[in-house]
Image: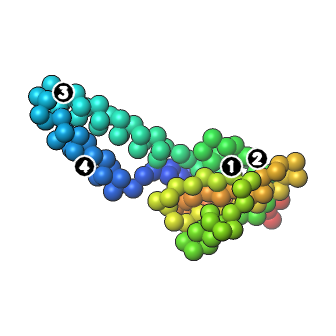
């Protein structure tokens, strides 16, 4: 059972832009006739839909003693404190304060994030930066499920 789960889907405006891009493809293929037009629209629509779905399919989950962030799976025992970051703090941590060794799960369309310290001395990763739409809830879930939480 998951304590926290979030899918970092792309915003609706990206789907609208993809639809406009496919429409432009259709306009470009229009002089070639109806068969290339329909084939191009089908292929372009499928490709755009697959790309947006894949990029927006990444999940963050806290479940079964682990934090799963994208393809990373980290036991909660290896994590330290979790800090919810507002828009300005998140910008700082993915910009001038960023550490090249950090694990960053970035989505540019999500302005807030959570920064989680890595407490495992064997791990060279100093912290995890996780884009999230609900930073307070994710930080609370990580804090509540830590083995040393009171």
- Determine the residue located farthest toward the right in the rendered image: 121
Task: Judge from the rendering whether residue 52 lies leftward or rightward of residue 44; answer left or right.
Answer: right
Q: Residue at x 16, y 41 (%)?
A: 27
Which of labels 4 and 3 is toward the front?
A: 3
Q: Residue 98 appears at what percent x and percent y?
A: 68, 63
> In this figure, which residue is indicated by the disc labeled 1?
67
> In this figure, which residue is indicated by the disc labeled 3?
36
Q: Is residue 16 visible?
A: yes
Q: Residue 94 appears at what percent x and percent y?
A: 62, 63
Sequence-first tag of 1 and 4: 4
Task: Judge from the rendering whether residue 93 lies leftward or rightward of residue 13; answer left or right.
Answer: right
Which of labels 3 and 2 is toward the front?
A: 3
Could you say whether the residue bearing mark 4 is in a helix, strand or loop? helix
Could you say whether the residue bearing mark 3 is in a helix, strand or loop? helix
Which of labels 1 and 4 is toward the front?
A: 4
| Residue in the foreground of this view, choosing between 79 and 52 | 52
Circle 2 packing at 10 Å, graded few (<14), some (14-19), many (20+), is some
Sequence-first tag of 4 and 2: 4
The part of the image, by quadrant, that contains residue 29 is top left
Q: Residue at x 19, y 39 (%)?
A: 28
> In this figure, which residue is indicated by the disc labeled 2?
75
Sequence-first tag of 2 and 1: 1
Which of labels 4 and 2 is toward the front?
A: 4
**Is the Cβ of the residue at disc 2 closer than 8 Å to that at disc 1?**
yes
| Residue in the foreground of this view, choosing between 89 and 120 | 89
**Is the Cβ of the residue at disc 4 closer than 8 Å to that at disc 3?**
no
> In this figure, which residue is indicated by the disc labeled 4?
20
């Amino acid at each position: 059972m998951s304590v926290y789960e979030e899918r970092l889907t792309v915003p609706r405006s990206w789907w609208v832009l993809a639809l406009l891009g496919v429409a432009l493809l259709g306009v470009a293929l229009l002089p070639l006739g109806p068969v290339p037009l329909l084939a191009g629209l089908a292929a372009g629509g499928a490709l755009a839909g697959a790309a947006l779905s894949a990029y927006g399919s990444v999940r963050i989950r806290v479940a079964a003693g682990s934090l799963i962030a994208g393809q990373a799976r980290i036991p909660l025992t290896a994590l330290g404190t979790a800090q919810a970051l507002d828009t300005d703090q998140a910008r700082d941590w993915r910009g001038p304060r960023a550490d090249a060794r950090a694990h960053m799960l970035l989505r540019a369309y999500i302005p807030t994030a959570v920064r989680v310290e890595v407490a495992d001395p064997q791990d060279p990763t100093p912290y995890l930066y996780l884009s999230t739409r609900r930073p307070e809830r994710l930080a609370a879930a990580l804090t509540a499920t830590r083995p040393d939480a009171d």
